[in-house]
Amino acid sequence: MGMEIGYQSSDKDALELGVIICKHCSEIIGTLPMDGYKKVHGICPDLDCMKTDDQKESAG
């Protein structure tokens, strides 16, 4: 009789459940290996998004 062995993931096999989203245009920038689903906001390399962020920082 065959015996099933439970799958154990290593860091190498971790699922890419973390999503990096641009906070200005909502474009997906990348993914990260996470234990569960996570949304992380950042700024994409688009010039309009970078300018918008620079304007908000200088105004605030």
Image (tube, grey):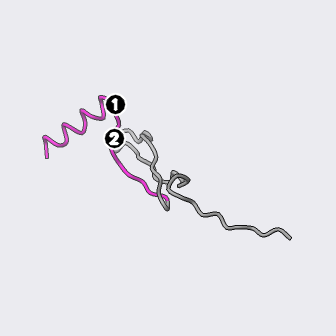
Q: Hey, what amino acid is under mark 1?
A: Asp
User: Helix or strand or loop: what does disc 2 sit on?
Assistant: loop
Dot 2 or dot 1, earlier in sequence: 2
Quarter of the image with the N terminus in it? bottom right
Q: Residue at x 18, y 37 (%)?
A: 55
Marks 2 and 1 in Cβ contact (< 8 Å): yes
The tally of labels here is 2
Q: Which mark is residue 24?
A: 2
Q: Residue at x 13, y 40 (%)?
A: 58
In the image, the segment drawn in magenta is 37-60
Q: Quadrant of residue 4?
A: bottom right
Local packing at callout 1 (Cα closer than 10 Å; few below 14, some 14-19, many 20+) is: few
Residue 44: x and y in percent read: 35, 37
Which of 21/34 is in front?
Answer: 34
Local packing at callout 2 (Cα closer than 10 Å; few below 14, some 14-19, many 20+) is: some
Q: Is residue 29 above or below residue 2?
A: above
Which residue matches tag 1? Answer: 46
Determine the residue located farthest toward the right in the rendered image: 1
Q: Residue at x 53, y 58 (%)?
A: 10
Q: Is residue 14 above or below residue 25?
A: below
